[in-house]
Amino acid sequence: MKTKILLMAGILVVMGLAKLPLTIFELRADEGQNVSGRNQPALAELDPEFVAEMTEAAEDALEAYEAAYNAGTARSTDVCIWSRRLLDGQRALAKTPTETMAALRAHRERMKNLFLKVNALYIEGVKGGEAERFDEIRYYLAEATALVEQATPPEEKGPARVEVNFRGPEGMHVQWDENSQSGRPFDSEPLVCPASHKFRRGRIYRMMFTRLPGFNGIKAHVLLELIGPSAEPVPVVLSTSDAEALAKGSGGTRVIYAPADRSEIQSINGNGNTLKEHIAEAERKGTVLAILYFSRAR
């Protein structure tokens, strides 16, 4: 029986009736085809009245699954799937590029927020943070980022890579996830502050800060989200107060932005409860370049 199943699978592959699912590395912007937008073109060909009904149902389902996930009774998978279905419907119904971009950015924001939650569970090694859940949300976040990048006009993109200047404290070591195939977290060669490195804009990098001067043994789990293009290096630094917070077992956030008056790049410190307010404040003052999230590593 096993031999027959394997033979049939081989025949289907040859006939083109069975295809392996695409990975984010295989996704590309073919002529006339959106990155990973495999459902969206099909929906656009359906009766708009039915698509509108599907989209409304997807929005209701997503809201329910998000509430269930936060209550611990649904999987992150469910949120990913229904967020993507909502996006497909919104894109099919969109009448302007502005509406399309709004839908793409909303989906990307949902995937980012879910990534933050799953990553925290993954770090702790608890339920909901299993390797398959972590890799799944990494996929959906990368896909959502690619879709936003594809839809962004060339004049708004800026350089694909941004230089990050790790200013200190002096002597602190910085490492990040560089090669997912290695199977080891934070596998890059360590940078010793002060040091600089160019990273891909639009991504969220998982990092580990170690050897904080004056705080022996304390390590920081860090997420660095690079948002806007910047002609100047984006400064990243852990202050003494940050290290003290880590020593007490807590963490924090920092919104890094370029002021509209083109003065020196600034940052706003905060925590999870006020992060949205700080992002809004930074957007009023200029352009958000990056967001830094840090917590103590056990």
Image (tube, rainbow, N blue to C red):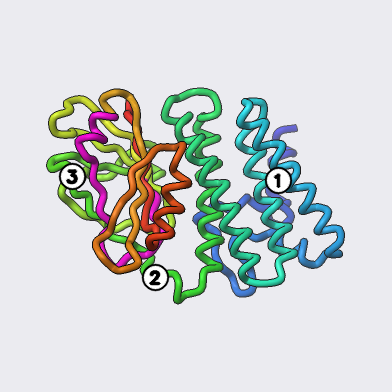
Dot 2 or dot 1, earlier in sequence: 1
Amino acid beneath label 2:
Gly
C-alpha span from label 3 to label 1? 55 Å
Residue at coordinates 46% horizontally, 35% vertically from top-left? 119
Reading the image, the residue beneath label 3 is 168
Reading the image, the residue beneath label 1 is 9
Dot 2 or dot 3, earlier in sequence: 2
Q: Is residue 145 left or right of residue 229?
A: right
Residue at coordinates 23% horizontally, 54% vertically from top-left? 165
Image quarter (top left, top right, bottom left or bottom right) of the N terminus: top right
- The answer to whether marks 3 and 1 mark residues whose Cβ atoms lie closer than 8 Å is no
Reading the image, the residue beneath label 2 is 158
Does residue 120 belong to the magenta stretch? Answer: no
Q: Position of residue 164 (x, y in %)?
A: 27, 55
Dot 3 or dot 1, earlier in sequence: 1
Residue at coordinates 53% horizontally, 67% vertically from top-left? 150
C-alpha span from label 2 to label 3? 27 Å
Comparing marks 3 and 1, which lies closer to the viewer? 3
Q: Which residues are magenta?
A: 224-245
Image quarter (top left, top right, bottom left or bottom right) of the C terminus: top left
Q: Position of residue 3 (x, y in %)?
A: 70, 36
Q: Position of residue 134 (x, y in %)?
A: 50, 37
Residue at coordinates 70% horizontally, 46% vertically from top-left? 9
SS at mark 1 in the image = helix
Instruction: Count neighbours of disc 2 (C-alpha within 10 A) and say few if under 14, some if 14 to 19, many if 20 or more.
Output: some
Instruction: Count neighbours of disc 1 (C-alpha within 10 A) and say few if under 14, some if 14 to 19, many if 20 or more.
Output: some
